[in-house]
Amino acid sequence: MSKQPIFQFRDLVGFLFLLVTGCTQQSVHLQPELSEQTYAYIARDAVKQLRALYPPAKTRWVIDGAQPSAFHRVLLQQLRQSGYAIQEQSETQSVPLQGQHLTIIWDALTNLAFYGSYRLTLTIDKAELSRLVDSNHIDSPVYWSYRP
């Protein structure tokens, strides 16, 4: 009668695979904190793109899902200074606001290969305007994508 090993080779390989994949999913990718001047630079560029598509004197923005982040505050300030009317949607309002609905999404890319990179997406009703922001090379040319 031969004794069976407690672990077989395939069990060991499976255990090592789970261990390695579990460790890679637990890693944390911290993004550098951006300065107020950097936010202002990005916001000016975003407003420039919006002005090309939506004239300030004729466009009223209804801000959806605004988050109280530094970038949102700077972008809203830039929009107001450029002549846009801004209304911020609150959850307690029962009457829908009139205007173009603008959703601002500012998020960090978490892949380590893109350390210092952020994505800015402006959703206007169903259209989407977005760009990648590299905080390490903020003044290098970056292209916007627009999907009507």
Image (cartoon, rainbow, N blue to C red):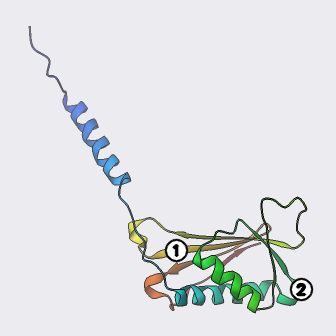
Q: Residue at x 50, y 90 (%)?
A: 140
Disc marking residue 58:
2
Disc marking residue 62:
none
Q: Is residue 80 above or below residue 71?
A: below
Residue 102 place in picture, x, y as percent? 76, 72
Say whether disc 1 or disc 2 marks the residue closer to the N-terminus. 2
The three-letter amino acid code for the residue at tag 1 is Tyr
Q: Residue at x 80, y 68 (%)?
A: 125
> Disc 1 designates what residue?
118
Q: Nearer the viewer, residue 13 or 74?
A: 74
The three-letter amino acid code for the residue at tag 2 is Lys
Q: Quadrant of residue 127?
A: bottom right
Q: Residue at x 89, y 86 (%)?
A: 58
Figure quadrant of the N terminus: top left
Q: Quadrant of residue 72?
A: bottom right
Q: How many marks?
A: 2
Q: Is residue 9 left or right of residue 142?
A: left
Q: Is residue 55 above or below residue 14?
A: below
Q: Residue at x 84, y 61 (%)?
A: 93
Residue 75 place in picture, x, y as percent? 66, 82
Residue 22 place in picture, x, y as percent? 34, 47
Q: Is residue 41 left or right of residue 18?
A: right
Q: Secondary structure at mark 2?
A: helix
Q: Nearer the viewer, residue 88 or 27?
A: 88
- The Cα–Cα distance between marks 1 and 2, rounded to whole angstroms, is 30 Å
Q: Is residue 82 above or below residue 145?
A: below
Question: Crowdedness of circle 2 by 10 Å Cα count: few (<14), some, many (20+)?
Answer: few
Q: Residue furthest front?
A: 92
Residue 96 place in picture, x, y as percent? 89, 63
Question: Crowdedness of circle 1 by 10 Å Cα count: few (<14), some, many (20+)?
Answer: some
